[in-house]
Amino acid sequence: MARTTRLLQCPPEAVFAVLADGWTYPSWVVGASRMRAVDENWPEPGARIFHSVGVWPALIDDETEVTEWNAPHRAAFIARGWPIGEARIIIEVRPHRQGCVVRMHEYAVRGALQYVPRVLTDPLLDFRNREALHRLGYLAEGQWVNDETEERSTPEERGDA
Protein backbone atom coordinates (compact mmCIF):
# COMPACT_ATOMS: atom_id res chain seq x y z
CA MET A 1 0.00 0.00 0.00
CA ALA A 2 1.41 3.37 -1.00
CA ARG A 3 1.27 5.88 1.86
CA THR A 4 1.90 9.55 1.18
CA THR A 5 1.81 12.31 3.81
CA ARG A 6 1.84 16.10 3.60
CA LEU A 7 1.54 18.94 6.10
CA LEU A 8 -0.93 21.61 4.97
CA GLN A 9 -1.30 25.14 6.34
CA CYS A 10 -5.07 24.94 6.82
CA PRO A 11 -7.59 23.23 9.11
CA PRO A 12 -8.93 19.75 8.25
CA GLU A 13 -12.29 21.31 7.33
CA ALA A 14 -10.65 23.13 4.39
CA VAL A 15 -9.34 19.83 3.01
CA PHE A 16 -12.77 18.25 3.29
CA ALA A 17 -14.40 21.27 1.64
CA VAL A 18 -12.31 20.51 -1.46
CA LEU A 19 -13.05 16.76 -1.28
CA ALA A 20 -16.78 17.54 -0.89
CA ASP A 21 -16.78 19.40 -4.20
CA GLY A 22 -16.66 16.59 -6.76
CA TRP A 23 -16.17 19.05 -9.59
CA THR A 24 -12.65 19.86 -8.29
CA TYR A 25 -11.46 16.25 -8.79
CA PRO A 26 -9.37 16.90 -11.96
CA SER A 27 -7.80 19.93 -10.27
CA TRP A 28 -6.00 17.80 -7.72
CA VAL A 29 -6.05 14.16 -8.91
CA VAL A 30 -3.07 13.49 -11.17
CA GLY A 31 -4.21 11.89 -14.41
CA ALA A 32 -7.84 13.02 -14.22
CA SER A 33 -8.49 15.31 -17.16
CA ARG A 34 -12.16 16.29 -16.98
CA MET A 35 -15.41 15.83 -15.07
CA ARG A 36 -18.53 14.53 -16.78
CA ALA A 37 -20.99 14.45 -13.87
CA VAL A 38 -21.27 14.45 -10.07
CA ASP A 39 -24.06 12.65 -8.21
CA GLU A 40 -26.33 15.08 -6.36
CA ASN A 41 -25.68 13.31 -3.05
CA TRP A 42 -21.86 13.53 -3.34
CA PRO A 43 -19.98 12.93 -0.99
CA GLU A 44 -22.36 10.55 0.80
CA PRO A 45 -21.28 6.88 0.74
CA GLY A 46 -22.43 5.28 -2.51
CA ALA A 47 -22.31 8.58 -4.45
CA ARG A 48 -20.17 8.68 -7.57
CA ILE A 49 -18.35 11.17 -9.72
CA PHE A 50 -17.84 10.49 -13.40
CA HIS A 51 -14.50 11.57 -14.82
CA SER A 52 -12.11 10.93 -17.66
CA VAL A 53 -8.42 10.10 -17.47
CA GLY A 54 -5.74 10.58 -20.07
CA VAL A 55 -5.20 13.13 -22.79
CA TRP A 56 -7.48 13.75 -25.75
CA PRO A 57 -8.05 11.85 -27.99
CA ALA A 58 -7.00 8.92 -25.77
CA LEU A 59 -9.47 9.48 -22.94
CA ILE A 60 -10.95 6.75 -20.77
CA ASP A 61 -14.29 7.49 -19.08
CA ASP A 62 -14.50 6.12 -15.55
CA GLU A 63 -15.85 6.86 -12.11
CA THR A 64 -14.98 7.15 -8.44
CA GLU A 65 -17.33 6.11 -5.62
CA VAL A 66 -17.38 7.22 -1.99
CA THR A 67 -17.22 4.23 0.37
CA GLU A 68 -16.71 6.18 3.62
CA TRP A 69 -17.19 9.83 4.60
CA ASN A 70 -16.30 10.97 8.11
CA ALA A 71 -15.50 14.66 7.63
CA PRO A 72 -13.16 16.20 8.62
CA HIS A 73 -11.18 13.10 9.59
CA ARG A 74 -11.39 10.31 7.03
CA ALA A 75 -12.76 9.54 3.58
CA ALA A 76 -12.43 6.44 1.42
CA PHE A 77 -13.07 5.93 -2.28
CA ILE A 78 -12.97 3.26 -4.97
CA ALA A 79 -11.46 4.77 -8.12
CA ARG A 80 -12.10 2.86 -11.30
CA GLY A 81 -9.60 3.15 -14.11
CA TRP A 82 -10.29 0.33 -16.53
CA PRO A 83 -8.57 -1.42 -18.21
CA ILE A 84 -5.94 -0.97 -15.47
CA GLY A 85 -8.35 -1.78 -12.65
CA GLU A 86 -9.69 -0.33 -9.42
CA ALA A 87 -7.95 1.23 -6.44
CA ARG A 88 -9.01 1.90 -2.87
CA ILE A 89 -7.97 5.36 -1.73
CA ILE A 90 -8.14 6.43 1.91
CA ILE A 91 -7.56 10.03 2.95
CA GLU A 92 -6.96 10.69 6.64
CA VAL A 93 -6.64 14.20 8.05
CA ARG A 94 -5.34 15.05 11.51
CA PRO A 95 -5.11 18.48 13.13
CA HIS A 96 -1.58 19.80 13.58
CA ARG A 97 -0.36 22.95 15.34
CA GLN A 98 0.57 24.39 11.91
CA GLY A 99 -2.64 23.26 10.17
CA CYS A 100 -3.26 19.60 9.41
CA VAL A 101 -1.49 16.45 8.29
CA VAL A 102 -3.04 14.66 5.31
CA ARG A 103 -2.20 11.03 4.66
CA MET A 104 -3.26 9.26 1.48
CA HIS A 105 -3.23 5.46 1.22
CA GLU A 106 -3.75 3.80 -2.16
CA TYR A 107 -3.72 0.21 -3.30
CA ALA A 108 -5.13 -1.85 -6.16
CA VAL A 109 -8.20 -3.96 -5.37
CA ARG A 110 -9.16 -5.27 -8.83
CA GLY A 111 -7.55 -5.58 -12.22
CA ALA A 112 -4.03 -6.05 -13.52
CA LEU A 113 -2.25 -3.79 -11.01
CA GLN A 114 -3.24 -5.93 -8.04
CA TYR A 115 -0.89 -8.63 -9.39
CA VAL A 116 2.12 -6.35 -9.81
CA PRO A 117 4.46 -6.50 -6.78
CA ARG A 118 4.02 -3.51 -4.48
CA VAL A 119 7.77 -2.94 -4.48
CA LEU A 120 7.22 -1.76 -8.09
CA THR A 121 3.87 0.03 -7.77
CA ASP A 122 4.22 1.77 -4.40
CA PRO A 123 7.05 4.15 -5.44
CA LEU A 124 5.10 5.17 -8.57
CA LEU A 125 1.89 5.70 -6.60
CA ASP A 126 3.79 7.67 -3.96
CA PHE A 127 5.32 9.89 -6.65
CA ARG A 128 1.89 10.51 -8.19
CA ASN A 129 0.19 11.06 -4.83
CA ARG A 130 2.85 13.54 -3.68
CA GLU A 131 1.77 15.75 -6.56
CA ALA A 132 -1.92 15.08 -5.80
CA LEU A 133 -1.48 16.20 -2.18
CA HIS A 134 0.53 19.20 -3.34
CA ARG A 135 -2.40 20.23 -5.59
CA LEU A 136 -4.97 19.44 -2.89
CA GLY A 137 -2.95 21.68 -0.58
CA TYR A 138 -3.07 24.58 -3.03
CA LEU A 139 -6.86 24.32 -3.20
CA ALA A 140 -7.47 23.79 0.53
CA GLU A 141 -4.95 26.38 1.72
CA GLY A 142 -6.08 28.93 -0.84
CA GLN A 143 -9.72 28.46 0.07
CA TRP A 144 -8.96 28.77 3.78
CA VAL A 145 -6.86 31.92 3.33
CA ASN A 146 -9.58 33.47 1.16
CA ASP A 147 -12.31 32.48 3.63
CA GLU A 148 -10.29 33.87 6.55
CA THR A 149 -9.60 37.11 4.67
CA GLU A 150 -13.27 37.42 3.73
CA GLU A 151 -14.34 36.99 7.38
CA ARG A 152 -11.88 39.63 8.64
CA SER A 153 -12.68 42.25 6.04
CA THR A 154 -15.60 44.65 6.18
CA PRO A 155 -18.33 44.69 3.50
CA GLU A 156 -16.92 48.02 2.24
CA GLU A 157 -13.43 46.49 1.85
CA ARG A 158 -14.89 43.57 -0.10
CA GLY A 159 -17.05 45.81 -2.28
CA ASP A 160 -20.29 44.33 -0.87
CA ALA A 161 -21.66 47.65 0.38
Image: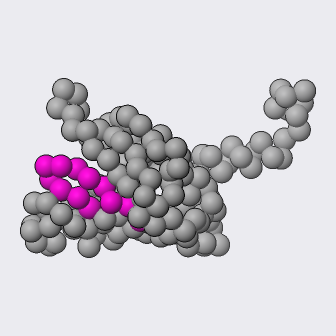
- In the rendered image, the quadrant that contains the C terminus is top right
Q: Quadrant of residue 129?
A: bottom left
Residue at x 13% of width, y 60% of height = 111
Residue at x 17% of width, y 32% of height = 58
Q: Position of residue 34 (x, y in %)?
A: 35, 35
- Magenta stretch prevailing secondary structure: strand
Q: Is residue 71 visible?
A: yes
Image side of residue 9 versus residue 59, left or right = right
Q: Position of residue 55 (x, y in %)?
A: 23, 32
Q: Nearer the viewer, residue 54 or 151?
A: 54
Q: Quadrant of residue 59?
A: top left
Q: Residue 84 colored magenta?
A: yes
Q: Residue 82 colored magenta?
A: yes
Q: Position of residue 39 (x, y in %)?
A: 46, 44
Residue at x 27% of width, y 44% of height = 62
Image side of residue 61 versus residue 26, left or right = left
Q: Is residue 120 visible?
A: no
Image side of residue 144 versus residue 22, left or right = right
Residue at x 50% of width, y 50% of height = 42
Extent of the magenta region: 76-87
156 to 5, vertically: above or below: above
Q: Nearer the viewer, residue 41 or 75?
A: 41
